[in-house]
Image (cartoon, rainbow, N blue to C red):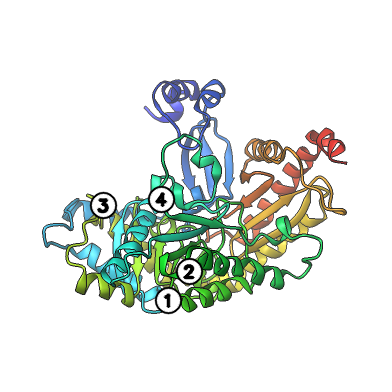
Amino acid sequence: MTVVDRGTAHWQKLDADHHWHPFTNTKALNQKGARVIVRGEGVYLWDSEGNRILDGMAGLWCVNLGYGRTELAEAAAAQFATLPFYNTFFQTTHTPAVELAHLIASVTPGDLNHVFFASSGSEAVDTALRMARAYWVVAGKPSKTWVIGRKNAYHGSTLAGASLSGMSGMWKYGAPLVPDIAHIAQPYWYGEADAAETDPEAFGLARARLLEAKILELGAENVAAFIGEPIQGAGGVIVPPASYWPEIERICRKYDVLLIADEVICGFGRTGSWFGSQTFGITPDIMTMAKGLSSGYLPISAVAVGNRVADELINGGGEFTHGFTYSGHPVSAAVAKRTIEILRDEKIIERVHDDIGPYFQERLRTLEDHPLVGKVDGVGLIAGIALVASKSPKRFFEKGDEVGLICRDHCFAEGLVMRAVGSRMVCAPPLIISRDEVDELVRLARRCFDLTLRDVGPLIETAK
């Protein structure tokens, strides 16, 4: 019996009785009933009521190849039949992990030649944190323990990931966070520049130089690393000015601080390059990746490590007492390998850079004539849309979270998935989206903004 045959109410009841959702007010969801997704094809999803939905978020920033790629199912089936599982402990390896590590090293920038596997972005970030601190111990500088991140950044929801993240809402449950972690302000020019900071590039330099100030405050001899997403994803798609990342890298090199790029969202073509680091012209010491690594088809993540850090830890560190049962899981590795081959052989990333990415950005910016839309930011196939109570003078909603959720709910009702981050709507469709599908996405978004404007009129009056 299929999901549809059993009926939506049946699945909603079971879901409410037993399924505890991540990042969700589960009580409220249980009262409402979850939307039950039953099928996906290309950039579209279908729910148990038969409604077609354009997935403007590629699942959760991850289904880069779209739904229904039979090649990935075939790669998984072949590996299941050959070797469904073996670990990479006990001085043992297997060919899927070896081949994938080699393939990742071939597409990463610089000398990121060593790859450590895990199962999620959060686990990859935890691994990067341990590697950075372990490196300085082996290098004879054990006082270098501090890691600097950014406010409003997201690096996962494990204890270490939440500690590195700059979202204070994730810190509210009282458990002690990982020590020796500091945060500096994010490079959000549209939302945080004051009236005197009209030049985005000058603002980008000023925000980057907050890193230098924090290093000097803590003492360079105590700072292990800086971690940042090339584009802050879950923070609302915060695209830094072009001046920002080169200055961050310069400061890290000046004070001998490791540079960790969190590529969990930006990696594997999202920005029109293999990695966001390449889009912004930097070469990190350590790089985390997940999501698009397997197009979201199976759980897998990785940490790519440059020669400086890897050589020190491998040659001088002895046993690296860290790892996971599913590190380099053979079926996940086989699917990830096939994903990278498809991205490469079909030149999907080049298409994002040269064709569909620019078209997506151009069409989204036609929405800037809407009364609610203050500014569209984006690169490639990732974008953030700021909703404002007034464009000139610029005024944000006092209850921006409410406005974003109103807009998100209209999107769902109208057959479009966009995510609300405060009063910013964010969008990151599958990389295989067509021009006609981009046009449909923009048309649906405009419709949802119209409906949101109708509903938030009182809030706009309050903001005046």
Circle 3 SS class: helix
Q: Quick one: 120 or 106, which is closer to the camera? A: 120
Label 2 to label 4, Cα distance in Å? 30 Å
Question: In the figure, is residue 197 to the left or right of 85?
Answer: right
Against 207, residue 106 (above or below) is below
Circle 1 SS class: loop
Q: Residues within 10 Å of mark 4 (few under 14, many from 20)?
A: few
Q: Residue 22's spot in the image, x, y percent? A: 45, 37
Residue in the image at 84% along x and 33% along y: 458
Residue 179 marker: 4
Residue occupied by mark 1: 109
Label whose residue precedes the other's in the sequence (2 or 1): 1
Residue occupied by mark 2: 275
Label whose residue precedes the other's in the sequence (4 or 1): 1
Question: In the figure, is residue 68 to the left or right of 93?
Answer: right
Q: Amino acid at mark 1?
A: Pro
Q: Residue 208's spot in the image, x, y percent? A: 60, 68
Against 278, residue 461 (above or below) is above
Q: Are marks 2 and 1 in contact (CB under 8 Å)?
A: yes
Res. 457 image quadrant: top right
Q: Amino acid at mark 4?
A: Pro
Q: Amino acid at mark 3?
A: Ala
Label 4 to label 3, Cα distance in Å? 43 Å
Residue occupied by mark 3: 77
Label 2 to label 1, Cα distance in Å? 8 Å
Q: Quick one: 337 or 460, which is closer to the camera? A: 460
